Image (tube, rainbow, N blue to C red):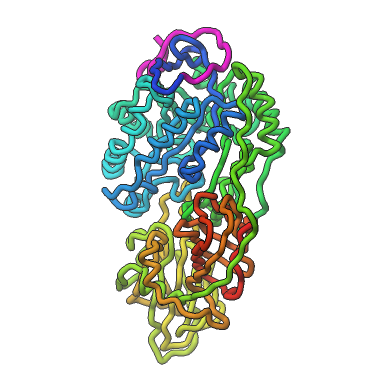
């Protein structure tokens, strides 16, 4: 009996042959883990997979992007599932059925699917996919065998997994494998927790093989593996050495690189990351020459719309300064953010063609682009305080500053207001535990920007005075030991050495920016020198299609087009424009909202090209 029989279908191995083709939609099959190969109805198959996060791609473009992956030579697609996207509050669910619709699109494309449901996904996604309402009270107890963590995980999986279960290959669907947790060996050693996750997947009806994925290092493979579950490796180079390390821990079973890092992601304020196409293609060839299956991460990265980009901490141990991730998740992938083939696509297609059964499909036509450049200037503006009055949450007053999690704010900002007693002479005003960035006003006048965890305002403050601190989360950490840390002012506000108590706090969540609500904002003429606030712009488009949006003169904030949130912009770079999916635009007038949080640029246009 195979060592993988406990949690997955398994069968005897045969010498590996061609990569195989996915069966037609609606035709069931038996996909198992053999001693050397994956087997489909007893026939050896090789998974040539690519990562595509359906939640980072507009649904109207799924079919095109899947067609691009198929044309590159892939027979399988892999996706994560972000829990926090679908359960913003305990028991309140969003469009969970989107996963099922995506898997149906995978079947239409004639591909297999690998699903990685978490509950933790990393993915450079806000909080690694874990809900803020869970990590807030539990902190480091998440991702452990803790009853208060496992109960909501159990509830979520039983809500989500029917989308997967009914689309398994054994039931005529495209799903061939499901992951247990995600890169747990990079985080912890709670074997009981990992085993419980595997058991829960089976209890929920998963009958295709389960697997884990970790870096090819001893401590990661020992911390992240589950007896009876196939282990796979994640790496960007050195395939032979990586697979040798995997074999030391798992002598039998098919080899697979579950994340072949063919590119990388960017952080705000850093240089753009990239990888030479020829070098990446050479590593892909090395993986396949080892007889292994592969999942190209990312095959198409897409975009972290609506402020869902996560953040990392600097340093080898990922515990240093915050490094927020940009909105684009292009990843220097073979299919770029706009769905276009790159040089990496061409070279990967050449390599993968050698392992395909028959000729590869033709490359799909590129998406339609906007017919001509278009631009518009603001025709209305509301100061940030007035936007808060209409769209903000109820104000709370507490002795010490509440964290975002205590206020129920996942993405957005919080205005903290505190009084400095007086009369008293000017003293330094400082904030401890600031996460992440605060624009400060003293008696309504701009006083500076704070951007370190323990920060001091440049100019001393005399009393009496009213101090407003507009604090923005730049993304919750998605990887490393500082995941699950709270946002907002997590320490206190001090005047000299004295804590200032009696803090009024009010959240402004990105989800509050819906058309019916924004229509109530009292927009007025754009004042000379207008600063932070909500700007309304109309842009006339003759022939809609994919476009790039630029905001010359702006500093930092968020943009919506026809109610669709494109995500964060920031003049810190390296990203200088935001991708606009064609289905978002319409012929004629398109309404754009620009929420500027720090600077001005009132006369600056919104440009689409």
Examine the structure image and report whether residue 15 is included in the region drawn in magenta: yes
Total marks drawn? 0
Task: Measuring from the top left, give residue 533's x and y in whole percent.
Answer: 48, 73
The residue under the point 54% across, 25% down is 75
Residue at far bottom of view: 423
Q: Is residue 359 above or below residue 492?
A: above
Is residue 589 visible from the viewing direction of this image?
yes
Tell me where residue 520 sits by quadrant.
bottom left
Task: Measuring from the top left, give residue 350's x and y in whole percent.
Answer: 69, 26
Examine the structure image and report whether residue 499 is included in the region drawn in magenta: no
The residue under the point 52% across, 18% down is 21
Task: Measuring from the top left, give residue 606's x and y in whole percent.
Answer: 59, 65
Is residue 401 visible from the viewing direction of this image?
no
Q: Is residue 354 above or below residue 328?
A: above
Q: Nearer the viewer, residue 411 or 95?
A: 95
Q: Quadrant of the N terminus?
A: top left
Q: Is residue 588 above or below residue 253?
A: below
Q: Magenta segment, which residues? A: 1-23
Q: Is residue 553 above or below residue 278?
A: below
Task: Measuring from the top left, give residue 5's x and y in whole percent.
Answer: 38, 15
Q: Give the side of residue 104 with respect to residue 17, left or right.
A: left
The residue under the point 39% across, 41% down is 98
């Amino acid at each position: 009996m195979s060592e993988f029989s406990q949690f997955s279908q398994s069968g005897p191995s045969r010498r590996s042959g061609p990569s195989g083709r996915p069966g037609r939609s609606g035709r069931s099959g038996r996909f198992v883990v053999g001693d050397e190969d994956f087997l489909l109805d007893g026939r050896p198959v090789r998974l040539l997979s690519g990562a595509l996060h359906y939640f980072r791609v507009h649904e109207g473009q799924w079919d095109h992007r899947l067609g691009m992956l198929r044309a590159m030579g892939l027979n399988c697609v892999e996706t994560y599932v972000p829990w926090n996207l679908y359960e913003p509050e305990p028991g309140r669910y969003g469009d969970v059925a989107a996963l099922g619709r995506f898997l149906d699109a995978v079947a239409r494309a004639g591909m297999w699917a690998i699903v990685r449901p978490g509950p933790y996904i990393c993915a450079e996604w806000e909080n690694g996919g874990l809900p803020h309402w869970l990590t807030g009270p539990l902190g480091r107890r998440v991702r452990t065998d803790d009853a208060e963590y496992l109960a909501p995980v159990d509830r979520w999986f039983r809500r989500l997994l029917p989308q997967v279960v009914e689309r398994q290959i054994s039931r005529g669907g495209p799903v061939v494998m499901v992951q247990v947790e995600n890169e747990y060996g990079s985080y912890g050693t709670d074997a009981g927790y990992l085993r419980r996750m595997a058991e829960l997947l089976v209890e929920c009806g998963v009958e295709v093989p389960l697997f884990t994925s970790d870096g090819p290092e001893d401590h990661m493979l020992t911390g992240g593996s589950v007896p009876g579950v196939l282990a796979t490796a994640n790496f960007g180079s050195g395939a032979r050495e990586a697979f040798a390390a995997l074999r030391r821990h798992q002598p039998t079973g098919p080899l697979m690189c579950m994340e072949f890092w063919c590119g990388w992601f960017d952080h705000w304020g850093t240089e753009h990351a990239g990888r030479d196409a020829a070098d990446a293609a050479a590593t892909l060839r090395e993986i396949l020459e080892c007889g292994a299956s592969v999942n190209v991460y990312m095959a198409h990265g897409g975009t972290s719309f609506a402020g869902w980009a996560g953040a990392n901490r600097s340093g080898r141990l990922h515990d240093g300064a915050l490094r927020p991730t940009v909105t684009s998740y292009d990843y220097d992938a073979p299919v770029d953010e706009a769905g276009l083939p790159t040089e990496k696509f061409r070279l990967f297609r050449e390599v993968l063609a050698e392992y395909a059964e028959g000729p590869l499909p033709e490359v799909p036509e590129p998406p339609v682009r906007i017919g001509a450049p278009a631009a518009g200037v603001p025709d209305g503006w509301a100061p940030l305080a007035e936007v808060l009055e209409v769209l903000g949450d109820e104000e709370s007053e507490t002795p010490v500053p509440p964290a975002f999690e205590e206020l129920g704010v996942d993405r957005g900002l919080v205005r903290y207001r505190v009084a400095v007693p007086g009369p008293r002479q000017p003293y330094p005003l400082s904030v401890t535990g600031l996460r992440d960035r605060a624009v400060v006003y003293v008696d309504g006048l701009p006083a500076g920007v704070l951007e370190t965890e323990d920060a001091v305002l440049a100019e001393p403050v005399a009393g009496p005075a009213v101090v407003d601190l507009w604090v923005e989360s730049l993304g919750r950490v998605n990887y490393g030991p500082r995941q699950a840390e709270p946002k907002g002012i997590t320490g206190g506000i001090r005047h000299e050495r004295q804590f200032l108590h009696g803090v009024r706090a009010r959240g402004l969540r990105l989800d509050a920016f819906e058309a019916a609500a924004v229509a109530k904002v009292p927009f007025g003429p754009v004042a000379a020198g207008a600063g932070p606030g909500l700007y309304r712009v109309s842009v006339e488009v003759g022939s809609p299609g994919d476009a790039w949006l630029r905001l010359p003169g702006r500093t930092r904030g968020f943009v919506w087009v026809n109610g669709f949130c494109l995500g964060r912009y920031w003049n810190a770079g390296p990203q200088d424009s935001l991708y606009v999916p064609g289905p978002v635009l319409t012929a004629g007038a398109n309404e754009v909202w620009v929420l500027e949080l720090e600077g001005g640029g009132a006369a600056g246009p919104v440009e689409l090209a």
